[in-house]
Image: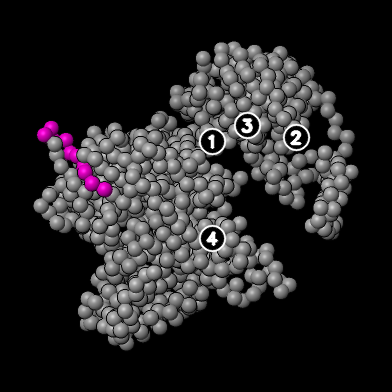
């Protein structure tokens, strides 16, 4: 009877130490103070809402540990079936997993209660994503598509909401985000799938989408070109299309990992579709919002895979005997194991801090849209807050996706290394974790694109503003004060490096963006871990080791940055050599 | 046709995670030292009942006998989809053995009434007797199917049932009403539903409301407290969240069959046996080595 929430001390620690009361208050926007015994099961107060969150995560932990995890390896080996009529039959284990998630009522996580959902904040949803991903990373790609319901909830009209949301919440429908095309991957402005209106005014979609996760799902949120003469993102609108005879799967991709998640190539044959929201806002507003949520989802997935890989490695290092000792007593292995653990806790601190800010931003936005305060001063303050949250999240979300996914690949790789030859064999799940991990730095925006987005915040005022706030914390403990001093030194170095990069121009910023973002993350996460370190001695050890090692890396990286070397650009042809012909 | 199902469930000490002080000096289970859990086989009984209701319609009523704290397993039944739950709780039922327990539960089933199928788990992990289900069937005058795995067919008042007899299966036809004791191989219990949990976590038995109100309204007068209790119980009842509560009088139990008086079982002696490892024995990885090992296992009755 494994429970992947109850057995995870660090996740429990965050649940207890994040300010969930603030998040719950923002999410619910007013409590009745009474027990709601009726069908709406609304929480009575903050404590009641948090009690619900804990119970919900306990259920997710139960489903993950008891039902999903035991099927992880068979899901990885079984493929899905593409039928001649263009539909897809999922393998039985994945179907059973989805059934368990529906029975547990976990498919309407963020959908409001009026539609039968759980009305959970992003923070809790991301924790559930982490829990499910630890059991089966590929199931997260289906479970984690709840942003589709969220997008419908925020942007679609009531007719569409009333029709679709209760069915999403019941687990009757699954969806997909159909964005990517053969010639539009990272560059979504190039989307070409055509949207046109027939003589009855009915929107229709024609074209092809590629690499669509769960493209065989029932509801496809499709980005399409509704303005035929346009060339850029402003000519794109978002549509909802139901799968049917005019919308079929042409191909299922073979992949390195996440085998339980079907990746489809879709053909739209004048498929009837409904417009979501307003024309021309498809990419610039709706998909951007959808992608932000999806990025946090991948960050959660990365944490889950890394957690699974770490646990496998930790246990193996403990039980495997060589040279007369457990291999964890060998310094080289001990270093790998502790690095993995610290990396996971560091990424977890950043991801859930980002979730927290996201929840505050989303709820502030919702209040401004649906019930703007009459009081002018309050309105002004909320609007100012909205701008500040937006700037901060514009930096934190891509940072989290980048940092957690890169961490995941490193941890999964090191976990396999700890298992040695056994790790390379299919008898152990370590190789599956590494294969599953590998996609996380690629989809929903590559690491390189996340850096482009995050570096704006590092070079703008978002970074400095947030760090200045974090530096206000005063630590009674001498050791923690010393570490805080190191972080202040690190922040000064980052600011200094930003000034240097700005003098060098755009190319230089793109070339050293990664080092800048890494350095900024060290400072931010350092502060988050310091705050955790107040709680107990273990956390103090984690914070110290993190700050010591990462400070050293930061100094080295920023020294290189300030050398002015731009040979990867200026001497590209010389160093890369001639373009090879492939055999 | 719809079937009215009754499931008997039990809260048990978690013997799967036994710690050093799990047993008292007198050899009885130290319930305080072990966390209380839903008896595992009973989860399969509940799932079997829910599956019948989901397919054919009808209802699922869960019954437990135990102290007030046993309402936790009843709420768990509501989380997973039971329609109605009832607690049988009475000090006079304390120290009941399987004979007295089966009598009391049979009386409770009669009191709930109007049933087609009674589901029990095969056995509870605290006593491991597997006697209560069969004894209930006798007392209720029902046919019994032990080691139940599946209804192959269920139509009108007739069922075709598969039971696992250890080295194979037996398929039986039986007329309803019937009592079955369910194996853990019968099904995979569904998880609790998040939406049900958020609602049904407020479900209470009247005695629990009494305790809560007494603790919260210490300064109030008796009549104020009584008014608050009545209001809360009424609200819970209106929303189907009142856990029904029976004592031995409510179920018309004859006291001579209950508690110590109704329990002929006498514990002769309880031994605390600690299994220790006695070193290793190497088995050669050859045909001969494996044959010798199998022979040895058969001789000491580990196999066969």
The local crowd at label 2, few if under 14, some if 14 to 19, many if 20 or more residues have their Cα within 10 Å, is few
Residue A248 falls in image quadrant: top left
> Can residue B48 be seen at all in this image of the molecule?
yes
Label the magenta part by its dominant secondary structure: strand
Residue A576 or residue A516, whichever sits in front? A576
Work out whether disc 4 and disc 2 sit on a shared chain.
Answer: no
The quadrant of the picture occupied by the C terminus of chain B is top right
State the SS at label 1. Answer: loop
Query: Which residue shows up at 46% across the image and 63% down it?
Result: A408
Work out whether disc 3 and disc 4 sit on a shared chain.
Answer: no
Query: Given the current orientation, which residue lies at the most extreme bottom position?
Result: A563
State the SS at label 2. Answer: loop
Alpha carbon distance from label 3 to label 2: 18 Å
> Can residue A19 be seen at all in this image of the molecule?
no
B52 left or right of A287?
right
A14 left or right of A332?
left
Which mark is on residue A431? 4
- Of marks 3 and 1, the one in the foreground: 3
Which mark is on residue B186? 3
Which region of the structure is painted magenta?
Answer: A199-208
Alpha carbon distance from label 3 to label 4: 34 Å
**Mark closest to the chain's N terminus, 3 or 2:** 2
From the image, tell me which residue sits under label 1. B190
Which mark is on residue B128? 2
Alpha carbon distance from label 3 to label 1: 12 Å
Against B107, is A544 above or below? Answer: below
State the SS at label 4. Answer: helix
Chain label for disc 1:
B
State the SS at label 3. Answer: loop
Query: Which residue shows up at 56% across the image and 15% down it?
Result: B155
């Amino acid at each position: 009877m494994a429970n992947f929430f109850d057995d995870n001390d660090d996740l429990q620690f965050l649940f207890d130490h994040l300010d969930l009361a603030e998040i719950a208050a923002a999410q619910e926007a007013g409590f009745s103070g009474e027990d709601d015994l009726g069908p709406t099961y609304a929480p009575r107060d903050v404590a009641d809402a948090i009690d619900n969150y804990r119970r919900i995560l306990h259920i997710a932990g139960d489903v993950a540990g008891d039902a999903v995890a035991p099927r992880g390896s068979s899901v990885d080996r079984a493929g899905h079936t593409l039928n001649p009529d263009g539909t897809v039959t999922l393998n039985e284990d994945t179907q059973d997993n989805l059934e368990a998630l529906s029975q547990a009522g976990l498919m309407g996580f963020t959908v409001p209660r009026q539609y039968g959902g759980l009305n959970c904040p992003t923070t809790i949803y991301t924790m559930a994503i982490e829990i499910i991903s630890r059991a089966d990373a590929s199931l997260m790609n289906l479970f984690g598509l709840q942003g589709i319901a969220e997008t419908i909830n925020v942007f679609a009209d009531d007719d569409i909401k009333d029709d679709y949301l209760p069915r999403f919440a019941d687990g009757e429908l699954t969806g997909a985000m159909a964005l990517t095309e053969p010639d539009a991957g990272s560059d979504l402005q190039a989307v070409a799938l055509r949207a046109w209106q027939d003589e009855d005014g009915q929107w229709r979609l024609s074209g092809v989408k590629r690499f669509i996760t769960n493209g065989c799902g029932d509801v496809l949120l499709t980005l399409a070109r509704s303005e035929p003469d346009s060339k850029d993102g402003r000519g794109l609108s978002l549509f909802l299309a139901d799968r049917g005879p005019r919308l079929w799967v042409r191909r299922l991709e073979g992949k390195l990992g996440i085998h339980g998640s079907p990746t489809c190539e879709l053909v739209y044959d004048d498929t009837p579709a409904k417009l979501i929201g307003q024309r021309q806002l498809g990419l610039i507003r709706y998909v951007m919002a959808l992608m932000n949520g999806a990025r946090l989802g991948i960050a959660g997935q990365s944490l889950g895979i890394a957690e699974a890989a770490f646990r496998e490695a930790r246990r193996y290092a403990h039980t495997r005997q060589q040279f007369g000792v457990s291999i964890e007593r060998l310094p080289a292995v001990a270093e790998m194991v502790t690095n993995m653990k610290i990396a996971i806790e560091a990424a977890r601190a950043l991801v859930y801090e980002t979730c927290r800010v996201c929840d505050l931003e989303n709820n502030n936005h919702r209040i401004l849209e649906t019930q703007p305060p009459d009081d002018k001063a309050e309105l002004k303050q909320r609007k100012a807050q909205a701008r500040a949250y937006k700037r901060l999240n514009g930096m934190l979300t891509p940072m989290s996706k980048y940092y957690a996914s890169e961490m995941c690949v490193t941890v999964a790789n090191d976990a396999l290394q700890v298992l040695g030859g056994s790790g390379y064999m299919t008898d152990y799940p370590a190789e599956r974790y590494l294969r599953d991990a590998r996609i996380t730095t690629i989809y929903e925006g590559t690491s390189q694109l996340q850096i482009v987005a995050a570096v704006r915040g590092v070079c703008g005022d978002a970074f400095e503003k947030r760090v200045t706030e974090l530096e206000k914390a005063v630590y009674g403990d001498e050791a923690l004060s010393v570490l805080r001093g190191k972080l202040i030194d690190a922040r000064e170095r980052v600011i200094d490096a930003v000034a240097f990069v700005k003098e060098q121009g755009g190319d230089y910023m793109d070339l050293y963006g990664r080092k800048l973002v890494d350095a900024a993350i060290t400072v931010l996460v350092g502060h988050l871990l310091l705050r955790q370190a107040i709680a107990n001695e273990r956390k103090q050890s984690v914070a110290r080791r993190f700050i010591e090692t990462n400070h050293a890396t930061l100094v080295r990286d920023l020294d290189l940055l300030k050398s002015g070397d731009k040979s990867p650009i200026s001497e590209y042809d010389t160093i890369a050599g001639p373009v090879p012909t492939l055999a | 046709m719809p079937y009215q199902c009754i499931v008997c469930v039990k809260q048990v000490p978690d013997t799967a995670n036994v710690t050093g002080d799990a047993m008292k000096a007198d050899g009885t289970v130290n319930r305080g030292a072990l966390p209380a859990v839903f008896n595992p086989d009973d989860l399969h009984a509940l799932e079997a009942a829910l599956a019948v209701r989901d397919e054919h319609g009808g209802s699922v009523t869960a019954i437990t006998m135990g102290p007030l704290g046993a309402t936790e397993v009843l709420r768990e039944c509501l989380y997973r989809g039971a329609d109605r739950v009832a607690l049988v709780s009475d000090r006079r039922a304390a120290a009941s053995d399987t004979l007295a327990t089966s009598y009391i539960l049979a009386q409770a089933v009669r009191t709930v009434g109007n049933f087609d199928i009674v589901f029990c788990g095969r056995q509870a992990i605290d006593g491991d007797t597997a006697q209560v289900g069969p004894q209930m069937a006798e007392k209720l005058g029902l046919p019994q199917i032990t080691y139940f795995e599946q209804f192959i067919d269920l139509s009108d008042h007739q069922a075709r049932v598969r039971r696992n007899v250890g080295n194979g299966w037996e398929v039986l036809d039986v007329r309803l009403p019937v009592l079955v004791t369910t194996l853990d191989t019968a099904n995979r219990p569904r998880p609790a539903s998040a939406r049900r949990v958020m609602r049904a976590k407020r479900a209470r038995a009247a005695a629990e409301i009494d305790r809560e109100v007494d603790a919260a309204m210490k300064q109030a007068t008796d009549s104020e407290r009584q008014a608050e209790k009545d209001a809360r119980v009424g609200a819970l009842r209106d929303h189907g969240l009142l856990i029904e509560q029976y004592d031995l009088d409510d179920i018309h139990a004859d006291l001579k069959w209950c508690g110590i008086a109704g329990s002929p079982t006498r514990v002769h002696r309880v031994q605390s046996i600690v299994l220790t490892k006695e070193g290793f024995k190497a088995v050669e990885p050859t045909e001969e080595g494996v044959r010798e090992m199998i022979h040895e296992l058969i001789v000491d009755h580990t196999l066969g």
